[in-house]
Amino acid sequence: MKIVLLGYMASGKSTIGKKLAKKLYLNFIDLDNYIEDKEKMTISTIFKVKGEIYFRLIEHKYLKEILNSDEKCVLSLGGGTPCYANNMELINNSKAISIYLKTSIKTLVERLLNEKSKRPLVANLEDEKITEFVAKHLFERRFYYEQAKFLLSIDDKTSNEVVTEIRILLH
């Protein structure tokens, strides 16, 4: 079984993915970390040195590699992954179970303000500009996110509660 978690940055994909993988005795793969290991450089360095087009090409390549492998895992995608190439089609045509961790703009902004320095897309934005940035991005990405097999609203839920809900969804 492959479970693919998708959603906007700070929606909890990695946190929930790690806990879910542990509960299900599966490996956890964070696509960004996987790319960094394969390319021997950080995502931000790849963007700076080789550009976004190169990044999106290798992101697609490695997503395909993971989906085509026999490894059972919980896979956490980058926030933009579903929106490029034919990545959602690839995910939905594989045997993977895709789950959109739907999070409100308010919750995302609260989380992003707390971890702004770790988020290159918002690190240089003034705090009052983040809400508009997230709202615009979510509007553009929602079409792709909502192609997931399952949609799970996760506001006001702990990561453990979300893991429990996912486990119920899977049975």
Image (spheres, rainbow, N blue to C red):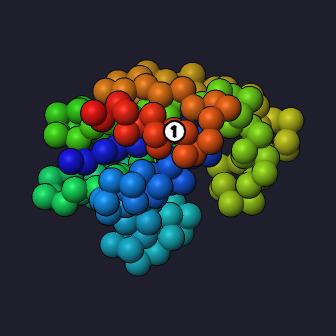
Residue 128 pos. (x, y %): 86, 35
Q: Nearer the viewer, residue 168 or 46?
A: 168
Q: Quadrant of the C terminus?
A: top left
Crowding near pointer 1: few (<14 within 10 Å), some, many (20+)? many
Residue 76 pos. (x, y %): 41, 51
Residue 104 pos. (x, y %): 65, 27
* Residue 30 shows in this picture: yes
Query: Residue 88 lies in what quarter of the image?
Result: top left
On screen, residue 145 above or below 28? above
Query: Residue 155 lies in what quarter of the image?
Result: top right
Q: Nearer the viewer, residue 78 or 53?
A: 78
Q: Residue at x 41, y 78 (%)?
A: 40
Q: Residue at x 54, y 26 (%)?
A: 153
Q: Residue at x 50, y 49 (%)?
A: 16
Q: Left or right of 19: which side holds 97?
A: left
Q: Residue at x 67, y 32 (%)?
A: 156
Q: Nearer the viewer, residue 126 or 111?
A: 111
* Residue 80 shows in this picture: no
The amino acid type found where label 1 is placed reads Val
Secondary element under disc 1, as helix, strand or loop, is helix
On screen, residue 121 above or below 84? below
Q: Identify the residue position indicated by label 1 in the image.
A: 162
Q: Nearer the viewer, residue 53 or 72?
A: 72
